[in-house]
Amino acid sequence: MNTLENIIIEVETGGVSFPTHSDVAFRVRLALDDPDIPMAKAAQVVVAEPLLAARVVAVANSVAFNRSGIPVTDVRGAISRLGLKFVRGLATAVVMRQMAGSIKSPVYQNLGVRLWEHTVHVAALSHLLAGRFGLAPDVAMFAGIVHEVGGFYLISRTDAHSDLSVDANMLTSDAERRIGGAVLAALAVPAEVVAAIEVLWQEGPLRFPPQNLGDLLQVANRLTPIRSPLQADDVQVLELPIDPEAERQLAEILEQSSDELEALTSALRY
């Protein structure tokens, strides 16, 4: 049995292990899952993770969310502007980024950075497109953030498993489904989001305009110019199978929202 299979069995039996410095962000993420958490308590929880607190304020003041031009200077005001669902997504982004950022190997650090660049662009596109096609932007962004969770987890385990080689040709669809599913469960990701990500793992037909979250995630993943470094070299990046009118509509949306897309991508990237 090889190392990859050992890790798959480990995560499937409840052995998901996050890097130590991700624990605080992970606990914050779970605390924010309480739908009845008071705003004051939510702000107190977010402040416990300084990087998350800084991100929340920065995003609240970005072009995408500061329509009035009036800046917020405190976490509570920023959460009020963004909403708890969006802040939960940012908390998960911190966990994901810290998983990749904890690696000692320069090679895998670089791989993690490239995977994060892909991830934040898909997340930002998902948020943008969801609002245009009648879907929930916050949920769509969250799905974009966690859609490569299996890859991030494997990269985070390379220090503990020196014989583990993570590259574009080792993560099969079955391995991605099994590892990704277990880590998504550990992160308490809602079933709706898990189902949407499973659409990517199944590589089913793409529908445009998107009818549900799975369709939307497929479109964003196909549309991003930043390819995942874990995508196999022999996988063809296909054009969106849409008619000229739909293509014109999509181009118009992207052009009109270019500042918003750039602001959100920059805010998530850090």
Image (cartoon, grey):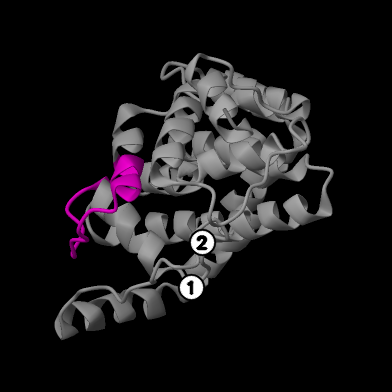
Q: Does residue 245 appear anywhere in the picture?
A: yes
Q: Which residue is mark 2?
A: 121
In what element is the residue under mark 2?
helix
Residue 183 to residue 208: above or below: above
Q: Residue 242, image x and y in percent?
A: 19, 75
Q: Residue at x 71, y 29 (%)?
A: 22
Q: Which residue is mark 1?
A: 225
- In reply to whether residue 242 is colored magenta, the answer given is no
Image quadrant containing the C terminus: bottom right
Q: Residue furthest front?
A: 1
Pick whichever, 269 or 243, lies toward us: 243
Asked which quadrant contains residue 161, the reply is top right
Q: What amino acid is labelled 2 in the image?
A: His
Q: Are marks 2 and 1 in contact (CB under 8 Å)?
A: yes
Mark nearer the viewer, 2 or 1: 1
Pick whichever, 147 or 245, lies toward us: 147
In what element is the residue under mark 1?
loop
Q: What amino acid is labelled 1 in the image?
A: Pro
- In reply to whether residue 209 is colored magenta, the answer given is yes
In the displayed structure image, the side of residue 147 where residue 151 appears, left or right: right
State the extent of the magenta-drawn residues as a range.
196-213
Q: Residue 196, image x and y in percent?
A: 30, 42
In the displayed structure image, the side of residue 22 where residue 78 appears, left or right: left
| Cα–Cα gap, marks 2 and 1 | 8 Å
Asked which quadrant contains residue 222, the reply is bottom left
Q: Earlier in the sequence, mark 2 or mark 1?
A: 2
